[in-house]
């Protein structure tokens, strides 16, 4: 069983920064064998993919609206994936989730992921 816990959310002003963490644990878990995706869901909206880091070669992917502002990274020794969020905008406000899938390759579809954390709230407002 793989368990995920998100942390690092909070309230910031537009233009501010936050770093989200996704800590993974479980018997026999090796982070580099798992693909980790970040998703977000705002009230009344569908869950959308934000970023992903592959479990094969570490390739990273970003949703268009966050390119150049967000950076995903992985620390295999700590079994942790990070999402550095800079130049935050009000439209980034959402509950952010990390998720894993068995596949070694990224997907932007929530339905392709098997295990989810509980989420961490990010609020960007003046």
Image (tube, helix red, strand yellow):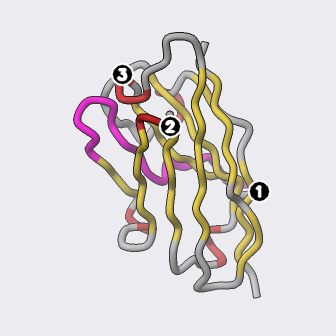
Q: Where is 90 relative to 58, above or below?
A: below
Magenta stretch in the rendered image: 44-59
Q: Is 52 included in the stretch rendered in magenta?
A: yes
Q: Quadrant of residue 97?
A: top right
Q: Where is the N terminus found, in terms of image quarters? A: top right
Q: In the image, residue 70 lies at what x, y percent?
A: 45, 66
Q: Position of residue 105 (x, y in %)?
A: 31, 31
Could you tell me which residue is drawn at 61 percent across and 52 percent down? 40
Q: Which image quarter: residue 11?
A: bottom right
For the point 66% across and 77% down, the residue is 90
Q: Nearer the viewer, mark 2 or mark 1?
A: 2
Counting from the top left corner in percent of width and height, residue 102 is at 42, 19
The numbered dot on residue 103 is 3
Give the foreground label among 3 and 1. 3
**Magenta residues: mostly which secondary structure?**
loop
Quadrant of the rendered image containing residue 72: bottom left
User: Looking at the image, which is closer to me, 2 or 109?
Assistant: 2
Return the mark for residue 43.
1
Q: Secondary structure at mark 2?
A: helix
Q: Earlier in the sequence, mark 3 or mark 2?
A: 2
Query: Residues under labels 3 and 2: Cα distance?
Result: 21 Å
Residue at image location 53% in from the left, 67% down from the top = 85
Given contact means CB atoms under 8 Å apart, are the residues at marks 3 and 1 in contact?
no
Query: Is 68 or 90 nearer to us in this picture?
Result: 68
**Residue 5 colored in magenta in the image:** no
Please tell me how crowded label 3 is: few (under 14), some (14-19), or many (20+) other residues with Cα within 10 Å.
some
Q: Which residue in the structure is indicated by mark 2?
A: 78
């Amino acid at each position: 069983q793989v368990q995920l816990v998100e942390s690092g959310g909070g309230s910031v002003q537009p233009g501010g920064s936050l770093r989200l963490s996704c800590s993974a644990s479980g018997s026999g878990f090796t982070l580099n064998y798992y693909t980790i995706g970040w998703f977000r869901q705002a009230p009344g909206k569908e869950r959308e993919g934000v970023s992903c880091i592959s479990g094969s070669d570490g390739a990273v992917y970003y949703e268009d609206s966050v390119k150049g502002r967000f950076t995903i990274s992985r620390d295999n020794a700590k079994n942790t994936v990070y999402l550095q969020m800079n130049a935050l905008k009000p439209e980034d406000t959402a509950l952010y989730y990390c998720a894993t899938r068995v596949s070694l390759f990224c997907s932007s579809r929530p339905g392709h992921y098997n295990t989810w954390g509980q989420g961490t709230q990010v609020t960007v407002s003046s």
